[in-house]
Image (cartoon, rainbow, N blue to C red):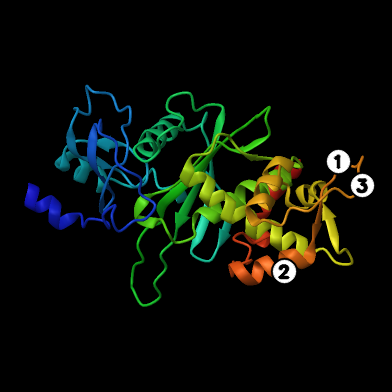
């Protein structure tokens, strides 16, 4: 059985090849996970029920469509050959965005509790301090799906969920994102920016300035700073006929919290001075932004195309 598993499930790059992988925890209940056909190491402990998943398990098999899990290979293979009732494109979640090979599906945690719980348990294997496990009814989950179309093949591979973020349906802190994860085999491809971009487009559609739930992990902080830097620089340079802008103007343009704008401007080292002694607004000079852009060589291409949102979803939001 061990030889069979190794042949069926090629291992993803090890953590030493994946620069986003943190030091692995010492109390791992599951050492490796098989997601569909891909085998890779876990990073942290998750709270799978011990009566179903024994402690110190070497390999946990997880369905790539419904995230149901099994410690044994044979039942897992039997589950995979069943009709794919749980595929995302067959009723689980609503397509809200599509662009090229990537799509976003919105899943209501209350309507699909088992799926959302299984997804959260899987995500905890790679998240240290954030996750939602069983109280999922008050959250929506936004799935990042890769559609591998191959014109030269008679049958293309089925869609693959490769990441997600969760969002409270009602956040008193205006959080537009609670938990975010791109699964390890698909990291370092810039896909996190798509999830972040979708979260801010949702803020825009809802008419509420927002930001991610705090505190951010160290990896989360690094990822968000890069995303915010590109977003802010693009917004500043895109506003015509103004040589200086206030933090409030930037926040309104980017649908970002003012404190996140200030944090990012400090990191970019382009934070200006107050316009007047009794004026609380801080001015940003476009020339300093252009100089920073030349030095940093950051890509200002927007990760999300507003035209990619499904028309029926936009109608629902407007209503």
Residue lying at 65% horizontally and 56% vertically, measured from the top left:
268
Residue 204 as seen in the image, left or right of residue 96: right
Q: Secondary structure at mark 2?
A: helix
Compared to 156, does 136 lie above or below?
above
Mark whose residue sits in front, 3 or 1: 3
Q: Nearer the viewer, residue 128 or 123?
A: 128
Look at the image and tell me whether residue 23 can be seen.
Answer: yes
Discs 3, 1 touching: Cβ within 8 Å: no
Residue lying at 61% horizontally and 46% vertically, measured from the top left:
199
Q: Nearer the viewer, residue 156 or 120?
A: 120
Other-residue count near label 1 (Cα within 10 Å), few / some / many at <14 / 14–19 / ≥20: few
For label 3, the residue is 276
For label 2, the residue is 290
Residue 206 in percent (x, y) is at 73, 41
Residue 75 in percent (x, y) is at 18, 39
Discs 1, 2 touching: Cβ within 8 Å: no
Look at the image and tell me whether residue 238 can be seen.
Answer: no
CA separation, marks 3 and 2? Answer: 24 Å
């Amino acid at each position: 059985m061990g030889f069979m598993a190794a042949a069926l499930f090629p291992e993803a790059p090890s953590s030493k090849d994946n620069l986003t992988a943190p030091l692995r925890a010492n109390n791992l209940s599951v050492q490796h996970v098989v997601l569909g056909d891909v085998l890779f190491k876990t990073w942290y402990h998750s709270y799978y029920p011990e009566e179903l998943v024994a402690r110190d398990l070497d390999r946990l098999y997880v369905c790539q469509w419904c995230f149901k899990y099994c410690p044994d290979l044979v039942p897992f293979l039997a589950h995979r050959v069943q009709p794919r009732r749980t595929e995302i494109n067959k009723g689980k979640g609503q397509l809200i965005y599509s662009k090229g090979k990537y799509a976003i599906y919105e899943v209501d945690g209350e309507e699909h509790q088992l799926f959302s719980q299984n997804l959260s348990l899987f995500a905890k294997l790679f998240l240290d301090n954030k996750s939602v496990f069983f109280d999922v009814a008050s959250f929506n989950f936004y799935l990042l799906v890769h559609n591998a179309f191959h014109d030269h093949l008679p049958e293309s591979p089925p869609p693959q969920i490769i990441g997600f973020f969760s969002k409270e349906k009602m956040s008193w802190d205006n959080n537009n994102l609670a938990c975010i994860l791109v699964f390890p085999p698909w990291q370092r491809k810039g896909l996190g920016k798509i999830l972040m971009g979708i979260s801010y487009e949702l803020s825009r559609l809802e008419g509420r300035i927002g930001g991610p739930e705090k505190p951010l992990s160290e990896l989360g902080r690094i990822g968000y700073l890069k995303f915010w830097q590109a977003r802010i620089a693009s917004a500043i340079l895109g506003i015509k006929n103004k040589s200086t802008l206030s933090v409030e103007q930037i926040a309104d343009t980017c649908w970002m919290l003012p404190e996140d704008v200030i944090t990012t401007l400090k990191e970019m080292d382009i934070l200006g001075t107050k316009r007047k002694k009794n004026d609380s607004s801080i001015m940003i000079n476009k020339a300093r932004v252009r100089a920073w852009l030349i030095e940093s060589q950051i890509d200002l291409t927007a990760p999300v195309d507003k035209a990619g949102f499904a028309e029926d979803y936009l109608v629902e939001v407007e209503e």
